[in-house]
């Protein structure tokens, strides 16, 4: 498959949503790589933009280039180890919002389909019941629109392109998806309408369970939903004064 021309957005260059002595959280725009690619022209990324001001910044997880939303970085090795273990052992809680094509019939459900790389068409992935890796996604309908549905997605596993392939397999590809949608479903949006809105984790220093949230451009109502659960203004205390262990 031919590589798309890489034209990452420049404004805002970096949007920091939270920072303390151990972690840094940003709102990654759609169209920007999480980390540099192999080619020189693919060096511009969320990590490289931060690295100039934070030379010790460490990547602990990634988002697809076309996916927008929350990314958390570690500012020291201790925080890096802690956060990576949490992602590895599924101790984090991630919530995405997606606009998908068509009317999703059930109000909520579970997609349990194993995934594997579609090697001749990489980076695409595909469902493979024989050799695919176990993959599970929970979904809830958030809003019904004329041609589309807004869904709240909770990935239980973290496979590459998992949410995109699972929604396609359900018969409702994410609109604007350059790999898994076609026709009007693709042209309906000028970007992939998939956004990482919420992330809960244990803070590396105090080990308290904390949550971060960034608003969703194509579903602004998400903020009101989150306010019923926690106050984003008080989502994390200032850890700069906590002793290092």
Image: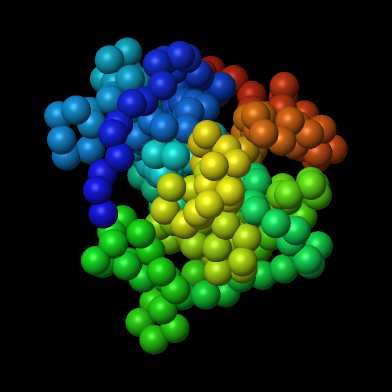
In the drawing, does residue 188 fall left or right of residue 63? right
**Residue 56 point in image, percent of width and height:** 28, 24
Q: Who's the residue at 16% across and 39% down the image?
A: 38
Expressed as whole percent of the image width and height from the top left, the position of residue 184 reads 58, 48
- Quadrant including the C terminus: top left
Tell whether 65 sits left or right of 142: left
Which residue extends farthest bottom? 130
**Which residue is located at x 40 percent, y 57 percent?**
160
Can residue 47 be seen at all in this image of the molecule?
no
In-front residue for pair 231/163: 163
Residue 117, horizontal then vertical, whole percent: 32, 66
Q: Residue at the front extreme? A: 183
Q: Is residue 163 above or below residue 143?
A: below
State the scheme by which the image is colored: rainbow
Looking at the image, is 52 positioned above or below residue 213? Answer: above
In the image, residue 72 above or below residue 169 = above
What quarter of the picture does the N terminus occupy? bottom left
At 53% from the left and 47% from the top, the residue drawn is 186
Q: With respect to residue 169, does 77 lie above or below?
A: above
Question: Position of 100 compared to 160: left or right?
Answer: right
Nearest the viewer among 228 and 222 is 222
């Amino acid at each position: 498959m031919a590589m798309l021309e890489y034209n990452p957005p420049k404004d805002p260059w970096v949007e920091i949503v939270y920072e303390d002595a151990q972690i840094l959280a940003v709102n990654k725009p759609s169209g920007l790589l999480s980390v540099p690619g192999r080619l020189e022209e693919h060096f511009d990324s969320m990590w490289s933009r931060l690295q100039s001001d934070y030379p010790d910044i460490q990547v602990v997880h990634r988002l697809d280039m076309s996916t927008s939303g929350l990314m958390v970085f570690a500012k020291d090795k201790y925080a890096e180890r802690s956060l990576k273990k949490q992602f590895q052992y599924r101790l984090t809680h991630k919530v995405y919002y997606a606009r998908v094509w068509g009317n999703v019939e059930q109000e909520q459900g579970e997609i349990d389909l194993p995934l594997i790389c579609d090697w001749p068409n990489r980076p695409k992935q595909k469902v493979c019941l024989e050799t695919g890796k176990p993959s599970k996604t929970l979904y809830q309908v958030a809003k019904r629109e004329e041609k589309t549905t807004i869904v709240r997605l909770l990935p239980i596993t973290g496979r590459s392109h998992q949410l995109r392939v699972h929604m396609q397999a359900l018969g409702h590809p994410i609109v604007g998806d350059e790999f898994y949608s076609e026709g009007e479903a693709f042209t309906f949006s000028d970007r992939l309408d998939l956004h990482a809105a919420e992330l809960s984790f244990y803070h590396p220093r105090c080990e308290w369970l904390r949550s971060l949230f960034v608003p969703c451009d194509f579903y602004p109502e998400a903020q009101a939903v989150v306010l019923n659960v926690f106050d984003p203004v008080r989502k994390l205390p200032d850890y700069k004064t906590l002793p290092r262990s």
